[in-house]
Image: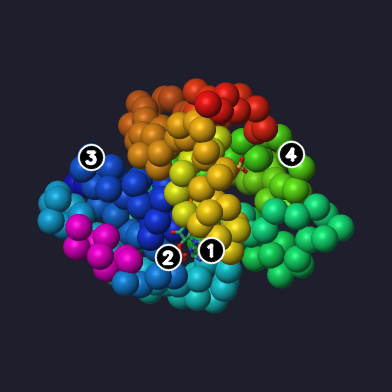
Amino acid sequence: MKPIALITGATSGIGKATAILLAKNNYKLILTGRRKERLIDLQERIKSESDADVFILNFDIRIKKDTERAIEGLPENWKDIDVLVNNAGLAAGFSPIQEGDINDWESMIDTNVKGLLYISRIISPMMIKKGSGHIINISSIAGIETYPNGNVYCASKHAVQSLTKGMRLDLLKYGIKVSSICPGAVETEFSVVRFKGDRNKAKQVYNGFTPLMAEDVAETVLFAVTRPKHVNIDDLLIMPTAQAFSRDFNRE
Ligand code: NDP
Ligand code: 8X3
């Protein structure tokens, strides 16, 4: 029987690349996100490229009721989730703390921390019941270091790091794996979202060096989920060769 992976935030970037790669590696997929058209397009693409079954769930992970309803409403044969990739997330804004937009702060905390918790709270008991499972939290170099103007985004990813450790400890006795994957700069829609649609500003983030691609991070997810039963990848930091730590770049 094919394992089932649920990937949050599969409409773009790392989540989408992970969906495509896991589909090619024998996984059935539950894909989530707010942009329904994109989920449908991805479902059709995956079905045409591989024989993977894809179930789409369209909801906003910040809304607890909608998240619960979506997962509880899954058909019984889709509830046997083997892998949860907690990927949905964003940075909103890039301001010093004294000028930060509180709506941006709430959106990051609600998505990156509370949304991750809502879905993990529903799926971890399902994994305990079936006696196995793997939760992969997409964290960040921002969960390890804090950089100027990164304040709340970095805090949200530090929370993801701490929650990964907490989950690992609490789920240890049930044999459930928990991993954190921490990428440096990946060129996705991340910076376009951070800079509120300003594509020129977003492009400048990756000027003069080769950033990671979403597919590079997807490869690390595949690596983590394909380790033998006795091996858990606790924490994996993946950086562009031209980026050391959060602020040091070798730009041309
Ligand atoms: P993208 O902006 O390309 O993708 C973000 C995904 O998250 C989208 O599919 C989006 O779907 C989903 N998402 C955002 N908000 C919500 C919400 N409220 N409800 C449901 N889904 C939501 O960025 P990335 O692929 O780069 O980001 C993926 C993860 O990787 C994030 O957690 C990010 O913090 C992390 N990361 C990114 C790095 C980078 O440099 N790009 C580096 C390190 C970590 P939709 O809008 O359709 O809802
Ligand atoms: C995204 C990486 O360094 O832009 O998490 O915050 S960074």
- 61 vs 8, left or right, is right
- Ligand 1 within 8 Å of disc 1? The answer is no
Q: CA distance from mark 1 to mark 2?
A: 18 Å
Amino acid at pointer 2: Gly
Amino acid at pointer 1: Gly
On the image, numbered disc 1 is attached to which residue?
197
Find residue 118 and report its horizontal and vertical position in percent: 57, 62
Q: Looking at the image, is mark 2 or mark 3 nearer the viewer?
A: 2
Find residue 208 and report its horizontal and vertical position in percent: 51, 33
Q: Could you tell me which secondary element the residue under label 2 belongs to?
A: strand
Residue at image point 78% right, 61% down:
100
On the image, numbered disc 4 is attached to which residue?
146
Mark 2–mark 3 contact, CB under 8 Å?
A: no
Dot 1 or dot 2, earlier in sequence:
2
Name the main secondary structure of what is drawn in magenta.
helix
Dot 3 or dot 4, earlier in sequence:
3
Residue at image point 58% right, 64% down:
196
Q: Which residues are the magenta region?
A: 38-45
- Is residue 163 visible in the rendered structure shown here? no
Which mark identifies residue 33?
2
Judge by depth and name the residue closer to the eye, 11 or 24. Answer: 11
